[in-house]
Amino acid sequence: MDRYERILSLHRTLKNARYPVTVAWLQDDLGCSRATVYRDLAFLRDALMAPITGDGEAGFRYDADEGERFELPGLWLSSGELHALLAAQQLLARSAGGVLSNALAPLQQRIENLLNAHSTGKEWPVERVRVIPHHSRRMDEQAFRFVSSAVLERRQLAFEYQARSTDQKTRRKVSPQRITHYRGNWYLDAWDHDREGLRSFSVDRITRARVLDEAARDINEDELDRHLASGYGIFSGEPRHWATIVFNPRAARWVADEHWHSQQQGRWLADGSYELKVPYSSSRELLMDVLHYGADATITEPQSLREQARALLALALSNYES
């Protein structure tokens, strides 16, 4: 019986016990040593917050009042997953400018308790888990609060939006659908009532936001995925093209293990190069990612995307001509 099964069995035994259960009986029932029984009792009490009462002489049981209401958490995590969750907590706290820090503080303490329970008596060095922001942008804390509240409360949202592509400021009224953290920044996916379509907004470009009383219009999950998650990157719209990029053997060792898109297709070529195919609707982000590899990547299809890459490279080269 592994630890997960022992904890479940121990929980059922203590929950159903009308009288204290001795350690000797638990040893026999769980098929483990006396020390293991005490460790599992401590994990159940300290990490999972079980209302255990009693001692090693009289036996253990759940508190008569709290025991009836107590249930094990629905989600169990391994130590590695708990570390990942700690990293996510740091990411949320940093990217939200501290908005979620207070709300997540009890969760972080609970996670640390679980980590310590896995560590055979030693405290996990949680300060050694680091998340380094990359290309993250400054964001208005109040705007993020209003956006996230509207998403969770399923209410419409009004705000001013200054798009980077045009630098024009417009007034928007939307039904929020999802909030997405992507490449160090937050984006709002929403139904735009004035334009009657799905749009994605960079939260750091949102100002003067306010949550409205009207209920948000809910869009079917399949439609959201088709419009917002089927193309490459953060730009919305169903994919109209497939791009084929060939990476030379030097870059192939990295790219072959990378996740570019949920529908990507990749294969090794005879000379050690790697061919990657991805769907896209807007070429902007895809071109940025491909050009990041410089001479190690070549767009082979479609021809229109090759021409766009050629033009961008020529423009970049002109910046260095005397």
Image (cartoon, rainbow, N blue to C red):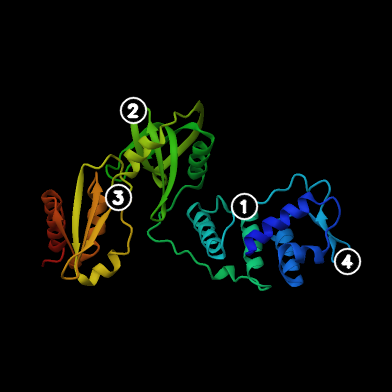
Contact check, label 3 and label 2, Cβ < 8 Å = no
Helix, strand or loop at disc 3? loop
Task: Look at mark 4 in the image and give the residue it sits on.
Answer: 57
Q: Quadrant of residue 290?
A: bottom left
Task: Look at mark 2 in the image and give the residue it sits on.
Answer: 196
Task: Look at mark 1 in the image and give the residue it sits on.
Answer: 102
Q: Quadrant of residue 206?
A: top left
- Give the label, 2 or 1, closer to the camera: 2
Contact check, label 4 and label 1, Cβ < 8 Å = no
Quadrant including the N terminus: bottom right
Looking at the image, is 275 positioned above or below residue 33?
above
Q: Amino acid at mark 2?
A: Glu
Contact check, label 2 and label 1, Cβ < 8 Å = no
User: Horizontal placement of 76 versus 264: left or right?
Assistant: right
Q: Which residue lies at the image location 57% right of the left edge and 65% below the top edge?
A: 79
Task: Look at mark 3 in the image and give the residue it sits on.
Answer: 263
Q: Please tell me which of labels 2 and 1 falls first in the chain.
A: 1
The residue closer to the viewer here, 40 or 284, is 40
